[in-house]
Image: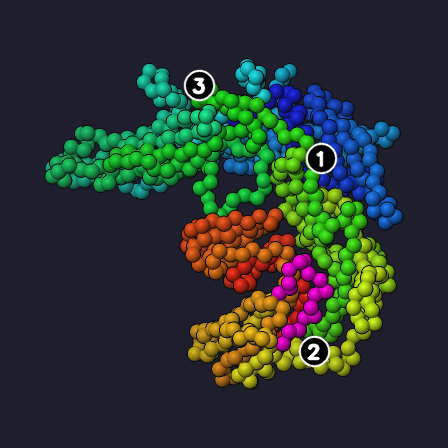
Amino acid sequence: MGVIEAEFTRNQFSALAQCLMLIEGLPTGSLAVLGHDRLIARLDWGLPTIVSSAPGVPARFGVLLLTADVTISHVSIAELDADPAAMTKTTGTATLTVTAVPGEGALQHLRIDLVALAIPGRPPSEPAFSLGIARRDFPVPAGVKVVGAAVLASDQAVTIRFVTGDPGELTAPTADRVVALDGAEWCIRISGEVFREQLLTALKTAIADFGAGMAVEEQPVATWQPLGPFGTGDWGVVGGFGVKKLKACSGPFGDVDLSVDVTARLALVPDIEAKSLTTRLVIAANASDWDSFRCWAAKGGPLTLLLAVVNPVPAIAFAALSLSLVGSMIADGVRNQVTGGDSRGDLREVASDDSSATYEGTQGLPAPLPTALIEAASAGPDGLVVSGKLGVPFGINHRATFAPAAEPLGQLQGDWVGGVTCEHGGGWKQTFEVPNVRVTDDAMALATLVMHVPVAVFRSSTVLPAEGWELQFDGWSARPEQRIAIVGNPAAAGSVGRAFLHTSAGIRRYDLTGYLRSPSGKPIGTGPVPAPPPAPDPVRVKILAVDQCRRFGRDWRDPRIRIGWLVDPPPFTYGVDALRHWQLAVSEIPGGATVTVTGHRDGADDRRLAALSPADGTAVAIELVTDAATELTLEHDLPAAPDGARLIQRWLLPTQVVALPAPAASLFRIEDGVGVRTVDGGLTVWSPTGEVREVAGAGPREAPAGAEPPPFSVTLRDGRVAAIHDDRLVVAIPFGNGSRTA
């Protein structure tokens, strides 16, 4: 049965485990052994030691035990309140397990869990559940299903083993090839059975797609063997099957059934200098000479067999999919979801004739780390074996970013924002708004980026006084970056608020203040949150509510409607001018009618922004992003006011602006990021880490398969908005909200 193994010398595996543990973000906000009032800010791991047993931890087959010294940095809210730089360090000894988890496709992974923690002077503590410290995917070749996995240790090596057949293979003695390979620190082996199973699956898939006029004479078979004569040449897989085309032709011999033998040869050719593996698949189909003669007589001439009867070649090549190998255990979590054809080694046709086709694909040789050095690679009786030096990154540290900065104390200044709300019949609502806090975490090896670490916000995050403030963020799950909003209500007035943000990237304290103003209203400093300004007279509020929330539908009696802006301007920006975000929806427009929206501002010519002439009875939606000074006018030729019309507005506070190489044709979400297809067929891809990639001539203007294509703007999973403004991609935080309805 198929076996995939990664072997390491014991010392190198300990270094690898430490690297994986240091790269990850903080896995938990508290540890019971310290008390639940202690907020964990950092875990610093020493070099683990491989052990055969640990007190209170039962031994399990296939699970490796480690012990490691750990330094825990922790603090309480009360201590942070008194001193934003407060921090306590406690040392202990952790017991950890290393487990290989089986699955299918890319679901296999290696995980390191904390199962016990001993701190001097305190009773030993075990988490209620094992605490995940590190996890790394361990992908296997496409089309291969792993049924069992184990991590095994010998006196000299550690083996991570995945099996694709009989789970009994897990208990076989370790080969310790890495020890026999002089000077090697790691070794990856993919047995020939894995490639045999892969090709056999492709052959079975091909015959399953044949129609009712085909009969299988010989079931698919495949073997791993030398491909040259007399056991020489490259190693690979040889397989095939036999099929019969029923009633392929009629003639002097009656109805003739035509037999076809299909063979497939898959060769693996590693190249050390190029650090690559070439896979070559040759598929051929040969018909029975006897049957072919009968069909020749029936047709009255030569027969191009595969075209006239059956051509299984494309079906097999398609079913073969990709021969992707074991990938990197440490990689950036943001994957290429758009362009495809990256380094997957997809097979491409390089030659063909009437009865055969040759496909080739080239990809990088497998290695456990991007920094690993490949020194040897071969395909032979044991399968594909690759080995070399590990090159574990050293000097692992985290570059956590809290913006605005807080080292260790930050200050967020804000102001009251008020406006008419159309909820519950209309009223006046005021909130104290401060800039959002952006949190990211990069794992570094000295000054080199290793990966962007997802950030989680822990439930211990809080704002004091609690009755005056609220924290808002996008759930508790980890994301490439977190945006945390802190919003005050009238109870916040009269004091300086304090936000304690506890995340997997660390802990920060922010003081929340207002502006001290001169008699003329000019800001001259900061101080406690001021009292909210008096609300307008209740009668005035009611008039505003009626005007802004209820009159919009009646306004349509006038063929020219001036659309007023309802939302107070933001008291801050993120370094880029705020934008206005407009959205108009009309329930039904009669056929032949036209709706036009024009933008105008002082000192500039009017600019037509949208014009619609929908089909009869069609609803209309118009969404626009303008600068902060543009007002809108709507013109229409409707014979009567629509049954329903709604206008909603908000500010967009840009955090990043990307100039596009050409006007945008479509905007769509790709996982946590966005893509912009431009009119020239190019593609701009933005990721939540702020990275931007340009893909010239990427294809048609439509969104790629699997993308979500909203018509105008895109709401990202972290709550931000991506929109297009003046041939620029704008990523912004929404602010405020105002609406009018018919």
> Residue flagged by tag 1: what amino acid is it?
Ser
Q: Nearer the viewer, residue 553 or 622?
A: 622
Q: Main secondary structure of the magenta part?
A: loop
Q: CA distance from mark 3 to mark 2?
A: 81 Å
The image quarter in which residue 149 lies? top right
Q: Nearer the viewer, residue 562 or 152?
A: 562
Position of 345 with respect to 648 (left or right) is left
134 lies above or below 78: above
Position of 451 with respect to 266 (left or right) is right
Secondary structure of the residue carrying numbered label 1:
loop
Which residue position is annotated with label 1? 130
Q: Where residue 634 sits: x, y (%)?
A: 54, 77
Residue 565 shown in magenta: yes
Q: Earlier in the sequence, mark 3 or mark 2?
A: 3
State which region is magenta.
Answer: 564-579
Which residue position is annotated with label 2? 545
Label 3 crowd (10 A; few <14 / some 14-19 / many >=20): some
> Residue flagged by tag 2: what amino acid is it?
Ala
Q: Where residue 214 sits: x, y (%)?
A: 29, 38
Residue 646 visible in the current orientation: no
Q: Are marks 1 and 3 in contact (CB under 8 Å)?
A: no
Residue at horizontal 74 percent and vertical 60 percent from the top: 434
